[in-house]
Amino acid sequence: PVDGAISQLGNINGRHLFQAKGHEFDLITLLGGNSELAKPFIDGEFATIYLAPKDYHRIHMPCDGTLTHMVHVPGKLFSVNQATASKVPNLFAHNERVVTVFNTEFGPMAMVLVGAMIVASVETTWAGLVCPQGKTVRQFNYAKQKAIKLKKGEEMGRFKLGSTVIVCLPKGVSQWPQELSPGTTTRLGQMFATLS
């Protein structure tokens, strides 16, 4: 979905995602405290991709999807580079973020756009500027509105500067390519996962 580098990827251990050596963070907290949104991703798969300031700052769809939910979670704006990730517990669950959930051919997919120092501005193509706005969690349910459908490769959001995108998938629906590991460069349009 983005130009960047893999920070971490692998299995979600129950509700816990690996952040860096000695640190994990909670799936429900990451998704804004909504346990129903988080339920399909328990014991699932995740990938955290870091976008450096030099990277292209737009986020694209890795597959076709229909938007069902968006959550804006106010928070801190810590740097999200690897050095900070190894030192700040619950980094991605503390920072301001925009959670998006899509229905796809393989079930739900969450894409979490994490703000960072100097990157308070997060936009989506359907809502425009989502953050920074307000100090309380805002939840948007798109299930009863006119369907917002995005095609594979279509732009879905953007950062003001580099930051982080976390993709969460349900258990057993995908496999990460063997060539993807922490530190691996990612490029928009390259194969990101295969259906199991």
Image: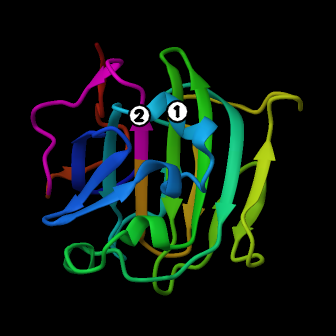
Q: Is residue 173 magenta?
A: yes
The overriding secondary structure of the stretch rendered in magenta is: loop
Badge 1 element = helix
Q: Residue at x 63, y 47 (%)?
A: 34
Q: Is residue 32 magenta?
A: no
Residue furthest toward the right?
Answer: 145
Q: Reply above or below: 3 against 67.
A: below
Q: Residue at x 37, y 72 (%)?
A: 91
State the image coordinates of residue 22 (x, y, percent, origin top left).
15, 66
**Span highlighted in magenta in the image:** 167-182
Query: Badge 2 local density, few (<14 within 10 Å), some, or many (20+)?
Result: many
The residue identified by callout 1 is 39
Query: Badge 1 local density, few (<14 within 10 Å), some, or many (20+)?
Result: some
Corner quadrant of residue 162: bottom left
State the image coordinates of residue 11 (x, y, percent, origin top left).
25, 37
Contact (Cβ within 8 Å) of mark 1 with mark 2: yes
State the image coordinates of residue 68 (x, y, percent, origin top left).
71, 33
Q: Residue at x 35, y 24 (%)?
A: 171
The three-letter amino acid code for the residue at tag 2 is Ile
Front one among 192 and 31? 31
Residue furthest toward the bottom?
Answer: 118
Q: Is residue 16 left or right of residue 106?
A: left
Badge 2 element = loop
Q: Is residue 36 left or right of residue 48?
A: right
The residue identified by callout 2 is 42
The three-letter amino acid code for the residue at tag 1 is Lys
Figure quadrant of the N terminus: top left
State the image coordinates of residue 135 (x, y, percent, origin top left).
73, 78
| Whether residue 60 is visible | no
